[in-house]
Image (cartoon, rainbow, N blue to C red):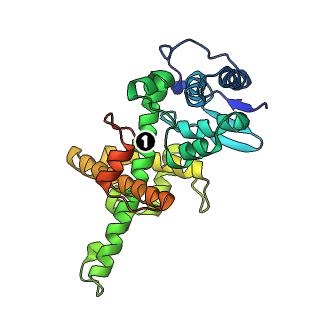
Amino acid sequence: MSSSVDTANPEVIDENDGPSESTVACDDIVARLREDVRAGDHWFEALLDAIGRWRAPNETLNKRRYNYLIAGEAFDWLLLAERLLDEISGLTPPNEVEALLFSGRWPIEIDDDQFAARLGAAKYSAHLNYTYGVLVEQALQLGVEEEIHKENHACPWGDDIRAHEGMFQRVYGADHDHLRETYHEQTGQMLADETSLSQLETFTYWLFKQRLKRQDKARVASDTRKGLAQLSRMELAISERRRGVKLSEDEFSKRYVPKGGRAR
């Protein structure tokens, strides 16, 4: 299955990233992935190796646009995993694939060092950028919105002006419209009223970078902890819905977070 590849944004590539395969076509990487799984390699390990060999930050396939690398810095490896797993759907257990793509649950134990080695140094660093700059940032935004909602209920007569302060104003120091205008001025990208997930994630990552520039270290640390805590609560809620049982955070950590700190 051929695709149209955009080879710009080479930051995802690093000469020290492992064996040089920058000229290998996407179709060749898919073919090798299929061969490795058929030869008996575990599909998840073969998948990570294929991701490590991948060299296209963006791609159009079957009229769908895949943006694996945001702003040349933030790598969504699960999006690339979804694309590659579609190619070998008959060779993988559907329940394990669903657990990976929708719950982030790995089918086998791989420690952090091995995971980083299979992706390569550049991609692993970009993966961390995506985790903190998109996922944690989205969780922070949601957490602050919930704070404002609670404040509004706590002062129904509007005694506390802060309760009517918007999330964007509170976190980024400007309202949403102003931030959109600044984003357009700095990037040349117009954020429409109806945006795709990829466009929204790109904007979120830009907001993350703006927050790092604007806030002092103590505020950055405080907001990051807030985002991480919110993300943990969201993961706990997903676990409860999917498994039909109520778990405490301690129980969740005991079941799903190995000593190395990575969710399964």
Query: Taking the image as drawn, is residue 206 in sight?
Result: no
- Vertical placement of 108 versus 52: above or below? below
- Vertical placement of 43 versus 182: above or below? above
Q: What element carries label 1?
A: helix
Q: Which residue is drawn at 47% across and 50% down?
A: 204
Q: Which amino acid does label 1 sit on?
A: Thr
Query: Taking the image as drawn, is residue 151 in sight?
Result: yes
Residue 25 in the figure: left or right of residue 9: right
Q: Which residue lies furthest to the top in this view?
A: 19
Q: In which quarter of the image is the C terminus?
A: top left
Kindly indicate the quadrant of the structure image that contains residue 52.
top right
Q: How crowded is mark 1: few (under 14 residues within 10 Å), some or many (20 or more)?
A: some
Q: Name the residue that disc number 1 marks.
A: 131
- Give how far across and how far down residue 72 sits, in percent: 52, 33
- Vertical placement of 8 versus 82: above or below? above
Residue situated in front as seen by the camera: 144 or 43: 43
Residue situated in front as seen by the camera: 26 or 114: 114
- Give how far across and how far down residue 218 sits, in percent: 20, 47
